[in-house]
Amino acid sequence: MAYTYRYSRPLLHSATILHRLNTVISCRQFRFSAFFSTKFVGDDPVLVRDFIHSALYHPDHGYFSQSPRSVGVLDRSINFHKLQGRKAYMSHLEKIYKQNDVSWFTPVELFKPWYAHGIAEAILRTTNLSFPLKIYEIGGGSGTCAKGIMDYIMLNAPTRVYNSMSYTSVEISSSLAKKQLETVGEVSSHLSKFKVECRDAADHSGWGDAEQQPCWVIMLEVLDNLPHDLIYSENQVSPWMEVWVEKQQDRSKLSELYKPMQDRLIKSCLDILNVDKDFRPQGTWEASLPSNVWAKIFPKPRRSWLPTGCLKLLETLHGALPKMSMIAADFSYLPDVKVPGERAPLVSTKIDGSSSDHSTYLDAKGDADIFFPTDFWLLERIDHYGSGWLKSRIENFDRSSKQGKKRRTITLDTSEFMEEFGLPTKTKTKDGYNPLLDDFINTKFYLSVPTHNTK
């Protein structure tokens, strides 16, 4: 059995069956409601992404503000060589969770320093060292990744590379920003090369003038907590509609409101999804029937989650750092998701050490994490869109253009990435079991670098 480590629960649980509502919903009727979270919505309706952003990041009521210990920090690295095997490792993991009383430990924390060392090796192996090494980390957590990377570069790169490097953490949480400085500061020479900018990385105004030199951007478990939008359609042929959140008349609970498509980010996400996609089956008898026939025979409401927060972030990063290379790692799949819809999030509250999952995101009231699986195919498309290549094809209706892509990209399973760039022998137990390679089957790495072969 393999495990997903966000909440250390089995990945291969039997899938939770999503219950489909039978009622056909009109434009202004409501599908879900909740008695919580009204503090995240004012007098006017808000898009789902704005509700999620408040539920997670509101400075007074958001999950990450109310749960400063949601992400764990280990006092010392795990000595895998002293553990007999999987059973001993899982027992040790259970013990440290109970001792620390946290929601989860990230992979970079569980496998420190080796996880960060693998990322550092990937950077050193592919970067142009004729320029000073510049690294930006989005959402640096406790600073474990930053310290691990800087340690590795100090010990393994030419002295001039370490001496001239800079590492900037862009962190939205002030408490985590302070923790990062403490963690990195454990090695005094790092501090002159490290800084934290406490701001939203997706806000282009915080970046200033575009950085014209090559640099690296690191995002570990960032994409899963970026706000998403939700769209809804009554059946297979009805137009998609934006989903908004508003208070009901009694002001005690929230409901969904459906509006015609207007939002730029939502429309752009749909364009990216559909640019080379034909939803109609080919070569079958079903293809010969009009789609509205199927909609009448088998009417099926549709709900789809769109990573508009990711689109906004990558558009901002491409504008601010046009020559950036990027490494992102995240969940490609989440088990037992109860919230309906394609790419739906897991909404989970942890109480007394046990996780409780919700069936609607509207239950999030500052005590629930909302995190999404990453569609890495779509992430690549959004990356190409942000670089301008795919955007040009969409806006100019030139989908047969021979112009080369502006990015070279690859998606790797975590085990593939670590076998290529890491030191997997360091995370192996006595009997050969290796949790970093064997258990993280629902996580992937995405690497993206600029190319000049655009013609």
Image (tube, rainbow, N blue to C red):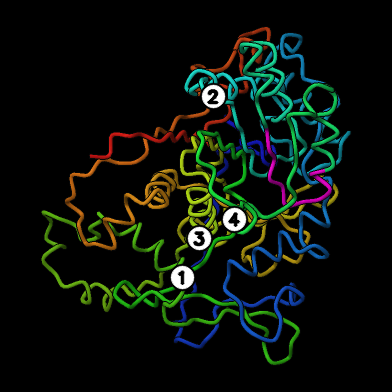
Please report the bounds of the magenta region as a residue range. 167-177
Please state the horizontal and vertical placement of residue 327, each as a whole percent of the image: 53, 34
The residues bearing labels 1 and 3 have C-alpha atoms spaced at a distance of 11 Å
Q: What crowding class fits label 2: few (fewer than 14 Cα within 10 Å), some (14-19), or many (20 or more)?
A: many
Amino acid under disc 4: Ala
Which picture quadrant has residue 33?
bottom right
Which residue carries the number 1 mark?
231
Q: What element carries label 4?
A: loop
Q: Residue 95 carries which label?
A: none
Which residue carries the number 2 mark?
123
Amino acid under disc 2: Ile
- Disc 2, disc 1: CB below 8 Å? no
Amino acid under disc 3: Thr
- Disc 4, disc 3: CB below 8 Å? no
- Disc 1, disc 3: CB below 8 Å? no
Please state the horizontal and vertical placement of residue 420, each as a whole percent of the image: 48, 17
Q: Which mark is residue 202?
A: 4
The residues bearing labels 2 and 1 have C-alpha atoms spaced at a distance of 38 Å
189 up-or-down from 63: above or below: above
Q: Is mark 1 on a helix, strand or loop?
A: strand
Closer to the camera in the image, 439 or 314: 314
Which residue carries the number 3 mark?
308
At 76% from the left and 14% from the top, the residue drawn is: 79
Task: Look at discs 1 and 3 and give the one toward the viewer.
Answer: 3
The residues bearing labels 4 and 3 have C-alpha atoms spaced at a distance of 11 Å
Q: Residue furthest right?
A: 99
